[in-house]
Image (cartoon, rainbow, N blue to C red):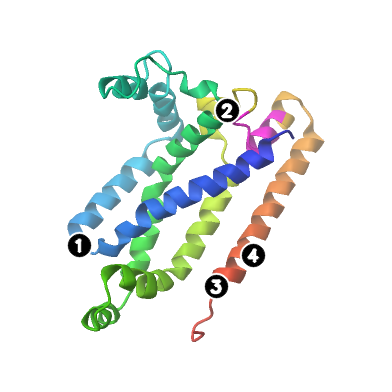
Amino acid sequence: MGNDFPNVVLYSELGWPRTYFGHSLRTVDLHAPTRLAVLTDQLDHSLGDPHHRQRAVWKTIYNSDYGALNALLMQLGIINHYVPWLNDPNRAMNLIILADVWHTVPFIALIMQAAMSTLPAELDEAAAVDGASALQRFFRIRLPFLRSAILVALIIRTVEAFRVFDIIYIITFGAPANGTVTISFQTYLETFSNHHLGSGAALSFLVSAFTLIMALLYMRFLYKPKGEN
């Protein structure tokens, strides 16, 4: 299996915090209709396009000869020559995570917004009257209230991280040096490239089992029955 399992753990551990924390703070003030409209518009763009088209766009952005990323950094004076971004395993994996986070952030933000919209305004107003700062209100009132939404988002993102395939298939195909091979992509290689059907089935079962274990752990630490303090 090589380093495919560490890669998927890295993908999950880096992709989830960037997705969640990149937009959890935005939910502090997403009640305004205009902001919600912007959010839903972004969601329509990210989920409405076929995945393969989005992945192909990102592959073009990262291209070492004519990619937009190189062109932008050259214009800003950050680099003085075009960089082969996908030639380094660690850098390639981080860029794949970045592309995936761009795609999934609106969905996670929408989950958080839905949870925030059910927060009684009286709680926040009472805390503000008592002198609590915006940061204190977020961590002491809003963040605990988001516990169930965070649980749902965590499970969804973990499942998606373990089944990630198309973005790797299109952008790197596991290169360089198998540095971007995750367990789902390894399952594909074992089954359809190497024709090891038994190994492919075993890896699929492993993904399902580990995902279930992670979901149970999330529920164990984050789920709180109603009425429990």
Mark sitting earlier along the chain (4/2) = 2
CB atoms at circles 4 and 2 under 8 Å apart?
A: no
Tell me how far mark 3 sits from mark 2, CA to CA: 37 Å
Coordinates of residue 162 in the picture (x, y in percent): 60, 45
What is the three-letter code of the residue carrying label 1? Ala
Query: Picture quarter containing residue 31?
Result: bottom left
Point out the stretch of residues depicted in magenta. Answer: 179-189
Q: Earlier in the sequence, mark 1 or mark 4?
A: 1
Give the amino acid type for the residue marked by disc 2 in the picture: Pro
User: At label 3, which amino acid type do we have?
Assistant: Tyr
Give the Cα separation between the discs numbered 4 and 2: 32 Å
Which residue is more in the foreground, 70 or 100?
Answer: 70
Q: Name the residue tied to disc 4.
A: 216
In the rendered view of the protein, which quadrant contains the N terminus? top right
Closer to the eye: label 4 or 2: 2
Q: Which residue is mark 1?
A: 32
Q: CA distance from mark 3 to mark 4?
A: 10 Å
Residue at 48% x, 58% y: name it: 153
Task: Verify CB contact (< 8 Å) between mark 3 and mark 4.
Answer: no
Q: Position of residue 109 (x, y in %)?
A: 36, 55
Q: Earlier in the sequence, mark 2 or mark 1?
A: 1
Q: Which residue is mark 2?
A: 89
Residue occupying image coordinates x 27% and y 47%: 41
Q: Name the residue type under label 4.
A: Leu
Residue at numbered disc 3: 223
Looking at the rendered structure, the secondary structure element under dot 4 is helix
Residue 101, percent from left and from top: 43, 43
